Amino acid sequence: MPRPTSPSSVEQRILAKLRAASKSRDLALVAPADLASIGSRRAVDIALHRLVAQDAIRRVARGLYYVPRVHRVLGEIRPTADEIVRALAKKHQLRIQPSGAQAANLLGLSEQVPLRLVYLTDGPPRRIRYGRQEIVFRRTTPRNMATAGRVSGLVIQALRHLGANAVNEQTIKTLRRRLTPKDRRQLLRDAPLAPAWIADTMCAVAVAVASPSR
């Protein structure tokens, strides 16, 4: 039976802080370093361990915690891997860019849902196990991050994953269907930032902007 907590305990103050953070629209992740004002590192670590044991909070990965959200019909709603990634990016002020199989899947160029989600970043590298999935933050060059957060960045990474030999007319048609005219204009603007063969494909996708539908 977990030890009861008093209103003045470290556990209660931590729980109050996490509950306040959880009221934001986006997922809020808290690390022990964020709780330094509440108590010593040892006291905070012990309190977090007890709160997890009591099911009052959840641990996403080592040193990352959140308050579970409960829907009155659906019950507890676990955050998605994407929510965790966005929360980490916001928390540490990182730029991120989905890459590899994930980028291809997001654009409809692959039906494979990868268990290993790779994000390029300008921050430190990191790996997180979340359920059956692994989230990987891979530090990359400023050039690869030049289009981060834009649709062109997603297209560049997806095409790079597929490879030049796998890109064909069907690939171009799929991207044309998925992307808005505004998105395709962005491809034209960002084409100079991509490798030559990817830039040619981006321009081919964007041609439909100037061509009337038949």
Image: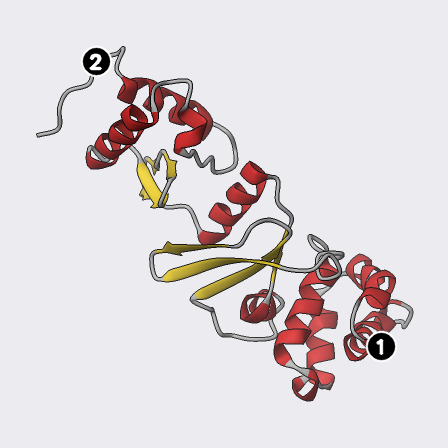
Name the quadrant of the N terminus: top left
Q: Earlier in the sequence, mark 2 or mark 1?
A: 2
The location of residue 176, given as percent across then percent down, is 75, 71
- The residue located at (39%, 31%) in the rendering is 32
Q: CA distance from mark 2 to mark 1?
A: 71 Å
Tag in front: 2 or 1: 2
- The residue located at (56%, 50%) in the rendering is 124
Q: Is residue 59 left or right of residue 117?
A: left
The location of residue 99, given as percent across then percent down, is 60, 65
The location of residue 104, given as percent across then percent down, is 60, 71
Amino acid type of the residue tagged 1 in the rendering: Arg
Instruction: Give the quadrant of residue 191.
Output: bottom right
Amino acid type of the residue tagged 2 in the rendering: Ser
Which residue corresponds to mark 2? 6
Q: Please tell me whether mark 2 sits on a helix, a strand or a loop.
A: loop
- The residue located at (37%, 56%) in the rendering is 129
Q: Is residue 145 left or right of residue 9?
A: right
Report the disc number at residue 214.
1
Name the quadrant of the C terminus: bottom right
Q: In the figure, 27 relative to 131: above or below?
A: above
Q: Is residue 8 left or right of residue 168?
A: left
